[in-house]
Amino acid sequence: DEKLLNHDFIRLMDYQKQDLFYLLELAGQMKHNWQAGIHSKPLEGRVLGMLFMKPSTRTRVSFETGMSQLGGTGIYLEADQLQLGRGETMADTATALSGYLDGMLIRTFSQDMIDTFAAHATIPVINGLTDMYHPCQVLADLQTIREMKGALKGVRLTYLGDSNNVAHSLMIGAAMTGMDITIGTPDHCRPDEGVIQKASVIAGNSGSKMAITSEPVSAIRGADVVYTDVWTSMGQEYEQTDRQQMLEAYQVNAALLSEAKHDAIFMHCLPAHRGEEVTADVIDGKQSVVFQQAENRLHAQKALMMALMG
Ligand code: CP
Ligand code: NVA
């Protein structure tokens, strides 16, 4: 399938539903081959630039490892160490780097920054997290949910807490794949209005149901998947105290989780703060699949790089 070759992966909503399912199939194959010890190097000689303006453990290491496993190389680029740090524009950086690289991964703050880079780059650009979205995370999460629940359509996912980048991508991902999604979040932390609109339209077409409520107990009732993320995302540290107060009632603890289905799984993109958005007994307990999610980042992103750069 060469349909996705040279495409960017910046927002899930830029993709067709069937392309998303194609990536999930390929991710499954990647995982199977890796587990079976079957190695091939389809990206031999290819180089992925990896520009980070925020810290990362999983994204950085899974992309760099994935690229090596496929025969290519990942180059970690810290914004401050580039001329970007001295004021060179994103546009000039994109044009220059397109002359060397076969693909570019970017983790940054504003969505504008990655859009500007992509507008000037002639190579595929992958979103490794912005303030608005985290599509690579949700690609791996969809793979994980499918593994655990056997399907996506009709699965009920409840996201509790801050309606951040991960929540936004989950809304779009759920709407595209026919999952039902409920966001339990305080009025002050509601999802971006534009994302709600977009997700509603996509959900309308796929038959997925979407709800947003400030009531945590009714939000979690009947859930197959319970998902949370940090209350204070990277770049919001100055609001931490306010956020802890606002979000207290949305902590995923054993009592709240018991309102979900008995076989519900618990998900978190990590890193986690035990005692804040989730208690230790939940994230370290039997229902938690957080490290399966983390591992699937490797397989899902190998599939993505194969499709865009293969
Ligand atoms: N989940 C995730 O993207 O983790 P990192 O910040 O460690 O990359
Ligand atoms: N919402 C978190 C996700 C980290 C992977 C953040 O943006 O910091």
Image (spheres, helix red, strand yellow):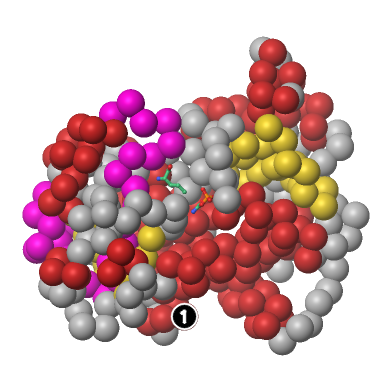
Res. 168 in view: no
Does the magenta-highlighted stretch encompass residue 227?
yes
Q: Residue at x 66, y 44 (%)?
A: 105
Q: On the rendered structure, is 157 left or right of 109?
A: left
**Is 62 above or below relative to 147?**
above
Q: Position of residue 144 (x, y in %)?
A: 46, 73
Q: Which residues are magenta?
A: 211-239
Check the image and report above or below for 178 versus 160. below
Residue at image location 43% in from the left, 57% down from the top: 269
| Magenta-colored stretch includes residue 219 | yes
Residue 47 horizontal side relative to residue 220, left or right: right
| Image location of residue 245, percent across then percent down | 16, 39
The answer to whether residue 113 of the structure is visible from this angle is: yes
Residue furthest out toward the top: 87
Amino acid type indicated by mark 1 = Glu
Question: Foreground residue, 140 or 68?
Answer: 68
**Residue 34 vertical placement versus 299 (above, below):** below
The outermost residue toward the bottom is: 36
For this view, does 186 lie left or right of residue 120?
Answer: left
Left or right position of 205 against 54: left
Query: 97 or 78, which is in the foreground?
Result: 78
Which one is nearer the viewer's eye here, 205 or 102?
102
Q: Residue at x 30, y 64 (%)?
A: 280
Q: Which residue is mark 1?
A: 147
Image quadrant where residue 171 sits: bottom left
For disc 1, does the CB lie below 8 Å from ligand 1? Answer: no
**Percent position of residue 20, x then y:** 53, 64
- The quadrant the C terminus occupies is bottom right
